[in-house]
Image (tube, rainbow, N blue to C red):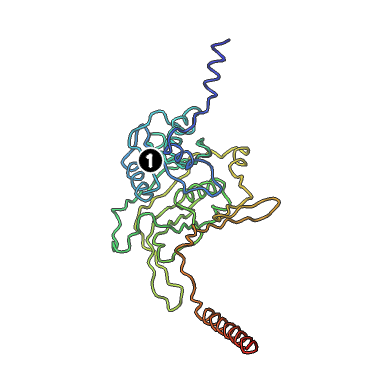
């Protein structure tokens, strides 16, 4: 009994960070009212074709700065099988990534990609697509001056009724949006928008995806004319399998706080009784070194009044002296 109790007490022990660096890492990973941009984890399966390897590499280039790529092959990852997602959850916790792209190749499912999202470092949902008609970045010829910059915010355009009516396409739309949008911002500089992802629903199970550069040209008005130049990569994504999140997990993941993050104001506190309280810091007063103001007019007036009073006293004294004589 004593040994069992001892084991349970060890398992329930909560380890606290012992260094400032570890504390900062835990605070960065803690839940926030406004979450950071989602990082992407890119993984290879047991076997990958040249097409899958190229797709994974070019996705990593497009997401540079917001993605982590492992080149080692992983035999234990089988996202759709029970127990096959343990390694995925371990890598998600290790790298703090909430989206993953897993590439594999087999006779049954050639040129296969599995896209998924994580919630609390557990698999939230999955969608499996096959790659067809892939064109690499190198196969496109264009003016390199208009090439998109790394880390720039993209336009994401979804065309086709299927993205509103077909459940699998709706799920793919959500996953691709989370994959490509990067940091969530309130304001954008129009000149900084230099890329666009165009997704077209060809059929209920097929989507054409391409990457374009944006050229801004004069239009005679304030709003410039936009031209799209295909810079690649481009591919057809054929939906094979998918797994929706269960309703309980979905409700938990979609919870949001009603309290909006308030901007912290320095030296101001809120008291239940007194209301808003402020602190004012005054530097140390060195009275001996403070220069006195020039009051020469007041000093002259005092001297004048003193002279008048003195003259009056002298006049009354001389009067008394004459009377006594």
Given residues 206 and 45, the one toward you in this image is 45
**Quarter placement of the C terminus:** bottom right
Q: Residue at x 45, y 34 (%)?
A: 88
**Quarter placement of the N terminus:** top right
Given residues 241 and 180, the one toward you in this image is 180
Residue 56 x %, y %: 36, 43
Residue 123 x %, y %: 51, 36
SS for dot 1: loop
Can you say whether 237 is above or below 229 in the image? above
Can you say whether 4 is above or below 130 in the image? above
Quarter assignment of residue 153? bottom left
Residue 300 x %, y %: 52, 82
Side of 144 relative to 240 (left or right)? left
According to the picture, the residue beneath numbered tag 1 turns out to be 111
Q: Residue at x 57, y 86 (%)?
A: 311
Residue 178 x %, y %: 48, 49
- Counting every numbered tag in the picture gives 1
Side of 259 relative to 299 (left or right)? right
Q: Residue at x 33, y 37 (%)?
A: 71
Crowding near the residue tagged with mark 1, few <14, some 14–19, many ≥20 C-alpha atoms within 10 Å:
many
Given residues 227 and 9, the one toward you in this image is 9
């Amino acid at each position: 009994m004593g040994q069992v109790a001892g084991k349970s007490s060890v398992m329930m022990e909560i380890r606290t960070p012992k260094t400032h660096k570890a504390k900062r890492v835990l605070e960065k990973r803690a839940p926030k009212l406004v979450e950071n941009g989602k990082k992407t984890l890119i993984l290879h399966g047991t076997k990958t074709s040249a097409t899958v390897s190229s797709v994974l590499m070019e996705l990593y280039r497009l997401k540079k700065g917001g993605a982590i790529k492992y080149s080692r092959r992983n035999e234990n990852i089988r996202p759709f099988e029970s127990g096959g997602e343990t390694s995925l959850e371990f890598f998600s916790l290790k790298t703090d990534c909430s989206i993953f792209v897993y590439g594999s190749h087999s006779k049954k499912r050639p040129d296969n990609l599995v896209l998924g999202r994580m919630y609390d470092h557990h698999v939230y949902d999955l969608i499996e697509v096959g790659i067809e008609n892939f064109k690499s970045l190198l196969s496109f010829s264009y003016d390199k001056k208009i090439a998109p910059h790394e880390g720039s915010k993209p336009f994401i355009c979804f065309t086709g009724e299927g993205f509103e009516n077909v459940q699998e396409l709706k799920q793919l739309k959500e996953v691709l949006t989370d994959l490509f949008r990067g940091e969530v911002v309130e304001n954008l500089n129009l000149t900084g928008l230099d890329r666009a992802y165009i997704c077209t629903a060809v059929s209920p199970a097929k989507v054409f995806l391409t990457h374009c550069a944006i050229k801004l040209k004069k239009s005679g008005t304030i709003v410039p004319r936009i031209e799209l130049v295909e810079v690649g990569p481009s591919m057809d994504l054929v939906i094979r399998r998918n797994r929706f999140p269960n309703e309980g997990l979905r409700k938990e993941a979609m919870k949001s706080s009603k309290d909006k993050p308030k901007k912290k104001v320095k030296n101001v506190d809120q008291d239940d009784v007194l209301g808003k309280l402020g602190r004012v810091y005054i530097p140390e007063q060195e009275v001996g070194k403070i220069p006195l103001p020039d009051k020469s007019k007041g000093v002259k007036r005092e001297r004048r009044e003193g002279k008048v009073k003195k003259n009056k006293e002298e006049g009354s004294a001389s009067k008394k002296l004459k009377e006594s004589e």
